[in-house]
Amino acid sequence: MRLRHLLRAASAFVIGVAGTLLIANPAHAAPAFHLPFPCGQTWQGNSSNSSAHVSWEIDFNRGSTADADLGDTVLAAAAGTVEVSAHQGSTNGYGNLIVINHGGGYYTYYAHLDKRAVAAGAAVLRGQAIGAVGNTSKPGNDISPHLHFEVRYPDRAQSHIIKAVFNGSTFSYPNASVTSQNCATSYDPATVCGSGFEVIDSAKLGSAGTANLLWKGSTGENCVVTLKMANVGTATATSAFLEPQGAARSTDSGNFSYYAGPVIRTSPGCVKWGGSTGGSSYTSAFEHCG
């Protein structure tokens, strides 16, 4: 029994030139990964000039200027559990990093984020907003805003980065233009809230949708949007609310086909926020005490 187990585990690898360990046929079927950006957006992926210079990683941009992508919404490429959500400090150049464990040995990495919207241990849906594009890195490392993306298998070793597959098609390395089919919802919460808003928190509402909290630093405003991911296009009970500490709560509630909100309030202090859809609801504590 033990020998069969070892042979089965070894079948995922081959030995390359000079003894290098290479990924061959994975022992587990990969999740159905999608581009980590909202539905319909087109991004330019670059592996040959990526920030970490490791095969199969991808740096993504879509704007015409160096800072055009700053604050753009980043989505989970597949469902899973957040294993890492932290700034890496001087340990490496990833800056604000989220790592999602998708099971079966598959992990996705989202680096240099301006904002992280999910905490370690959180379960996330495919298409859930998890953060915003940024240029965070280690001290002294000056980079332009972009999303650094990786898929690793069968563990988190950097030598185990594998080719990314989006919507069933392998990324055309080293460089390609890719349009997102990550369409569990057809709306970007930042677009719903308006220019200048970035996703700073997100909560999964069962499998029915997500509640999303956004922030606009230039005006000191928060925004809440509840996005439906089930019964999309059919009017069902959906709500979003925002309550600045010491002030009355504002709520948008009704039978909506796509989303509830945006609920926008000036909130210089702490806020309580949340929403509901499909019979699931979320209410935060007073937090994000800017």
Image (cartoon, rainbow, N blue to C red):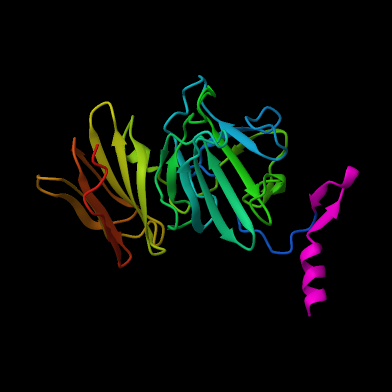
Task: Please state if 265 lies on the left or on the right of 185 as rendered.
Answer: left
- Is residue 129 visible to us here? yes
Number of marks: 0
Q: Quadrant of the C terminus?
A: top left
Q: Image quarter for residue 279?
A: bottom left
Q: Nearer the viewer, residue 121 or 229?
A: 121
Residue at x-position 29% and y-position 32% = 216
Q: Quadrant of the N terminus?
A: bottom right
List x then y, in percent, for residue 58: 64, 37
Task: Please state if 32 lies on the left or on the right of 133 as rendered.
Answer: right
Q: Nearer the viewer, residue 260 or 12?
A: 12
* Vertical position of residue 259 compared to residue 223: above or below: below
Residue at x-position 54% and y-position 50% = 77
Q: Which stretch is magenta?
A: 1-23
Q: Nearer the viewer, residue 209 or 138?
A: 138
Specify whether residue 151 is painted magenta. no
Residue at x-position 63% and y-position 63% = 104
* Vertical position of residue 249 compared to residue 290: above or below: below
